Image (cartoon, coloured by chain):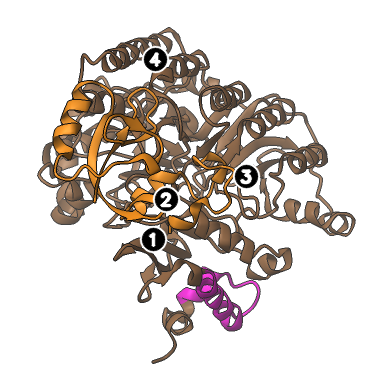
Chain colours: A brown, B orange
Amino acid sequence: MYKYDEYDQQMVDARVAEFSDQVRRRLAGEITEDQFKPLRLMNGLYLQLHAYMLRVAVPYGTMSSKQLRMLGHIARTYDRNYGHFTTRQNIQFNWPKLRDIPKILELLASVEMHAIQTSGNCIRNITTDQFAGAAADEILDPRPVAEILRQWSSLHPEFLYLPRKFKIAMSGATHDRAAIRFHDIGLQATTNAEGEIGWEVWVGGGLGRTPIIGKLINPHVPHEHLLAYLESILRVYNRYGRRDNKYKARIKILVHEEGIDNIRAQVEEEFSHVKGGVLTLPQDELDRIGAYFAAPAFERLNSSAIDVAREKIINPSYGRWLDNNLNAHQRPGYVSVTVSLKPIGGAPGDATSEQMEAIADLAERYSFDELRVSHEQNLVLPHVKIADLPAIYEKLVEIGFAEGNAGLITDMIACPGLDFCALANARSIPIAQELSRKFAAPERQKQIGDLKIKISGCINACGHHHVGHIGILGVEKKGTELYQITVGGDATEQASIGDILGHGFVAEDVPDAIERLVDTYIARRESEAEPFIAAFRRLGKEPFKEALYGNG
Amino acid sequence: MKLLTGNDLKTGFVTWWTGADWSLHIEDAADVGEGGEAIAAAEEGARRVNAPYIIAGEATTDGPRPAHIKDRIRALGPTVRPDLTLKPADPNAGDWVI
């Protein structure tokens, strides 16, 4: 993992001192809320529905045990004993007091964490594949480049007042687990005809009220020019992005209105000035940063297959967990473990202090001290010996996070919704909880297979509903919560945006409506091997529309 | 009726204007009529409240209630975590929210 050097620590410490003074001045009445608001937002501090909310960055979703333990400590000491992991691989505390914020930031800084870049119109915390550095299908580990991008983008003086927020996601693997086509910039590791590794650059993707799939602006940017190329994109956006209308200010609107060819030409023009300058990334610097992410001291193990069928007979729950919550690792004898933060009936992404500490202990003991946060609101132990799986599972059972449902229908994304969020129009978590209970039966989940449900409580789409195989969007109509259902979204390399099938449903009718969609899929699929999204693409939306609304 | 609400400056917790002071409990809220903005300005100036604003309310037999669902959830706390609401021991506390 990356370790702060003196400049990183100095920068974060200076920011803590600066914001602590701003908090002091606010509490003393020396500055008004109107003056304080832009300052607190630059430090990840929101005023939400019930209280202040502090959003802490987990850069590219990578954490150490010590860091997770500190998050648990903060939750216990300064919040209400839990935190909420988000779709941007961050963590939110829902109840911190303003007077405690300086101390919380000081504690975060002591473990090389902060809340910068989690709010405001800047380049936000960069996200990546939760299996980075471990996945068997990886072209390269994206984290060294992600770290370099973090250093480039943190408090970048030219890009602190962009037209709107700016999100970058990266994938170093062939299978996109980071939803890169739905970010302002998506970076996909690729190899060109000469065998050189570089980056496909996608631009102008996003969700929110105007969901758009990103467009390929450059098929191969070498490492050495990546910073210069990204700076060129940001400059074009900073110059021409719509500052006149908040809802049209994201780069996706600029790309959509101007056309990708025009934007590409503008970027190339800028790039011709920037390329080869101070932003050129020397190989030795890439190597220096890369050394922080060197593979841990893996043992030389024989590849050993897990006899899941046998384990299922002995302990069906453990068998299901083995079936669903392991990801293939680069090294023989190792796997990555998804710790599902989606217990049946639970709030997706929530973890208590005790749970965080227990998972930190597991990471320290069994995963070389490393952890990841996934954009699907789970935690990951990236480097686990197959032989250690029973001990890990046993501990997860103890803390209530042993659900073997990763990638299944109960592994839902849900935003905090109207229970916590001042922007929301409807509640999300109760819908997720009801669906979780409805589809809890293991055999039913297995029968359904790979099906991603994503729930947002408003059109801002923090719950990624547009890219759910089934998406649920909470809206408000005449003071009542209603839920629109979309079908056919996909956040992967086969990116698609779900179709709204018709009028919305009241909350109590949503679980049955989803079940009708599921039953239609099962009745119409070619075989068990055809997943929901493939069946939808083959069948089109009509059978699913009929399932929801009849054929009248 | 009209209710004046905001957040406590130091804690951020939701507060309601009682006619003389601020309370965490919606039951204590007073109808501010047309005087809400003046009270808000004075109270914000005195640093007793953060970002106050006026909402529509309804008088009920159990006291004043916000008219809008968002404000009702704001008054009670998260419906999915009764233990974190202002009435953790009352299983029916959320009944009036929805």
Residue under mark 2: which chain is it in?
A: A
Pointer 2: what residue?
A417
As drawn, the label of residue A12 is 4
Give the magenta range.
Answer: A511-537
Residue under mark 4: which chain is it in?
A: A
- Circle 3 SS class: loop
Residue under mark 3: which chain is it in?
A: A
Where residue A242 sits in the image (x, y, percent)?
A: 13, 45
Foreground mark, 3 or 4? 4
- The answer to whether B62 appears left or right of A121 in the picture is right
- The amino acid type of the residue labelled 2 equals Gly
A183, A522: nearer the viewer: A522
- Circle 4 SS class: helix
Residues under labels 4 and 1: Cα distance?
Answer: 38 Å
Q: Earlier in the sequence, mark 2 or mark 3?
A: 3
As drawn, the label of residue A474 is 1
As drawn, the label of residue A136 is 3
A148, A275: nearer the viewer: A148
Instruction: Judge if badges 2 and 3 mark residues of a common chain.
Output: yes
Give the image quarter of residue A52.
Answer: top left
Main SS category, magenta section = helix
